[in-house]
Every structure is written in C-alpha cells, then in structure tokens.
Image (cartoon, rainbow, N blue to C red):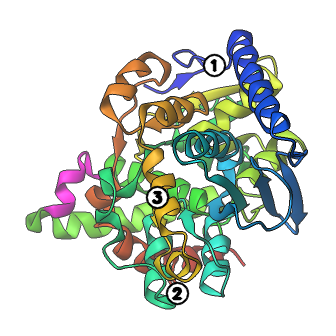
Amino acid sequence: MAQTGVTGYMLLASSCQRRRRAAVRRRTLARFLSRGVQPCISARLILLLGGLSLLVCTFFAGCGKSENVVTLLNVSYDPTRELYHEINGMFAERMWKESGVQVAVRQSHGGSGKQTRAVIDGLEADVVTLAVASDIDAIAELRGWIRRDWQKQLPNNSCPYTSTVVFLVRRGNPKGIRDWDDLARDDVAVVTPNPKTSGGARWNYLAAWGYALKRSLGSWDKLRDPRAKEEVARAQEDAQAFVKRIFGRVPVMDTGARAATNTFVQRGIGDVLIAWENEALLAVKELGADRLEIVLPSVSILAEPPVAVVDAVVDRRGTRTYAEAYLKFLYEPEAQRVIAKHYFRPSVDTVAEEFRERFPNLERFTVDQVFGGWERAKREHFDDGGSFDQIMNAER
C-alpha cells in the first residue's frame, strides 16, 4: 500500500550540527588569515546560464590561478548542488591537512542529458557525477574520454549512493494521489522533466513503466520466461499506453529535475511532482510540511547515479591523483554521512545501517531486472524513435 506524508523520514540538519559546521568554517578561515593571505570570499558562486548553473566552491587562497592550487571540475546533474557544495569543502580541507595542497572543486549542474552533451561537445570535466550510467557510457563511446570499464573502478558499480522516485503533492493531498494509477487520471496534472535532457526524468519514466508491467504480469519474473512471450508483449503495449496517459497529463516538461521542482513548488503548476526522493525531501524541508507532502508509491525504481573520472582530461591536466581521490572520498564514512544528510541513500552498508530509520522501506526494482540494463533501456526508450518519441509524437 502506498504511504503518504513524511513519516519514516528524519530531516537531518539540526541547529547543533549547523553550529558545529559554522565553527569549522571559522577555524578554517582563521587558519588562512594567520598565513597572511586573503581567502576567496565567495564559497558558492552561482551563475545561471539558461538553466545551467555553475557552482564554484573555492576553499583556497586567492581567486585566480596559482601554482599552489589544484582545480577540478565536477560536471553533475541537477539536484546535487547542495550535496557537492558541502562535499567539496570537506575534501579540500582533507587534502590541505594531509598533503598541504589547496584544492578547488568547481561544480557544473543541469539536466544529466544536457551535461552529458556538454562534455561530449568539449566541456573539460575532471570528473562526472551523473544521473544514469548510459550518460557516462555515451561520453566513453562518443567522445572517447572515459575508459569503457569505468564502472569497475569504484565500489557498487561506481555508484556512491542510491535514490528512488516518489511523489510530491500539496498539503492535504487534495487530489487523493496514492499510486501510479492516479497520475493517469484526467483530473490530475503531472510535473516531470523531459527524459531527453534529464536523467531524473528517465528514472521517472522507467519507474512508471515498470509499475505497469508488474500490474499486468503480476511478477517481473515473467519478463525472462520464454513461455510468457505473448503475455509480456501485451503487457509492454499496456505499459506504453499507461505511460502515454501520464505524459499526456504533463503541462510543462523542464530540462532538469531542479527546474521541474521549481515549476511545481514556486510556480504552483501541477497537482503532483514525480521526483527524486532527495529532491522531494529537500522541498519539504525548505518550504515546510504545512505546504507539501510526500507520497510513496507501492512500487518504485532503484536509482543508481554513477560517477567516473574523465581520463583524457585528468591525464592532460595532470589532475588524476586528485580526481581519483575525490571520487574515492565519496565512499568514506564521513562523506557517506553527508550524503545521507542531503537525503541520498548511502551505498556503504555500515553507514546505511546508521540511517536505516531515516529512509522508509519501499519495493524497488532495478533497470537490469526489468529493462535488461541501461544500454538496452536507452536504445528502446530514449534514443531517437524509441518509445518516448513514439508517445510524444502521438500526443501532437
């Protein structure tokens, strides 16, 4: 049964934690000043460029180039701004303490598909932290900047955290939304970003499709049963029709997850937002439970956002050591706890156990289980002429 409200979620950032973080920042600032250098005042510079935002975390002396400063560019997807802003400061402090090297990590954010295209077109990222594995595969295949076996370089197929897809509704849930079927109703307006440009939207799309398959088949196991071939074919047709009805209820398709959240929350468009779990929790935290509620569907998807070093760039710039250390840092308990604080689910078991009560249990299927992996899912659903194009062309 679907669950409503935010029961089971614990919003983290207590005032005590905020005071401790402020004290750390003051001590760090004092350390720089004691050396007679002026730190860059802005720790978080946001440049909005047509929906693409660039966050610069400059935890180092001075604001220009320096032989004593190593700069990294992390090209990431939409809802990770706050997470990496904090991670970058922690990593910079760690590197300074351990090696005396000043590290500046710049951040670029936007829809995962748009970010992927930017790197393919020449944006020189040292690391990419994107929404779906197929985006990193595309950089490896089309640009050749990333090794083909990138998923084997870090634990959990290079996924330092996971998430899932939930619904965000207005306080009181006025449309009585309980599960995926409600999103296909004629009286419900749905907000979700565009799967062509947003990795989060692709998770949303596949989550709805997977739900429809289970509703028709009773079990995803039939997808691999040769005896159920005809039944599966009918179920796939029904799933496409179901997802078509949902997308027929979408008045605005933004390019990224954060823009879609703003459309729903700030502009007041739609009755329900299909969202990353962390994005929904952040919205409730920022705006209050008196304005928004989270609905857990009966079934959702295991979202696994991956990370990778951009080999060609780090080798050319001489930043491989720091880029690799940066991604490995994401798996350390200190960083994993920050990941949980920002409402992503830690992938390291010991830390995940610490936060077990903060993330409700939810039946989740994987892309491999239902769609045969991201390469096949991308080809069948999101490439030109795939199921998404078929749905949108039929809507015109």
Question: Relative to residue 260, is residue 212 drawn left or right?
Answer: left
Q: Secondary structure at mark 1?
A: loop
- Label 2 – label 1 distance at C-alpha: 42 Å
Q: Amino acid at mark 2?
A: Gly
Q: Quadrant of residue 177?
A: top right
- The residue under label 3 is 206
Residue 255 rendering spot, x and y as whole percentages: 73, 65
> Of helix, strand and loop, which one carries label 2?
loop
User: Label 2 belongs to which residue?
Assistant: 385
Residue 102 magenta-drawn?
A: no
Q: Is residue 313 left or right of residue 32?
A: left
Q: Residue at x 31, y 51 (%)?
A: 155
Residue at (79%, 61%) from the top-left corner? 54
Quarter-wise, where is residue 276 in the image?
Answer: top right
For this orientation, the residue located farthest to the left is 227
| Amino acid type of the residue that numbered disc 1 sits on in the rendered structure | Leu
Q: Is residue 268 above or below residue 125?
A: above
Residue 279 image point, x, y percent? 66, 40
Dot in front, 2 or 1: 1
Real-space CA distance between mark 1 and mark 3, rounded to the nearest whole angstrom? 28 Å
Find out whether the residues at labels 3 and 2 contact each other: C-beta distance under 8 Å: no
Question: Residue 11, labelled with which disc?
Answer: 1
Q: Is residue 196 visible?
A: no
Query: Mark 3 or mark 2: which comes first in sequence?
Result: 3
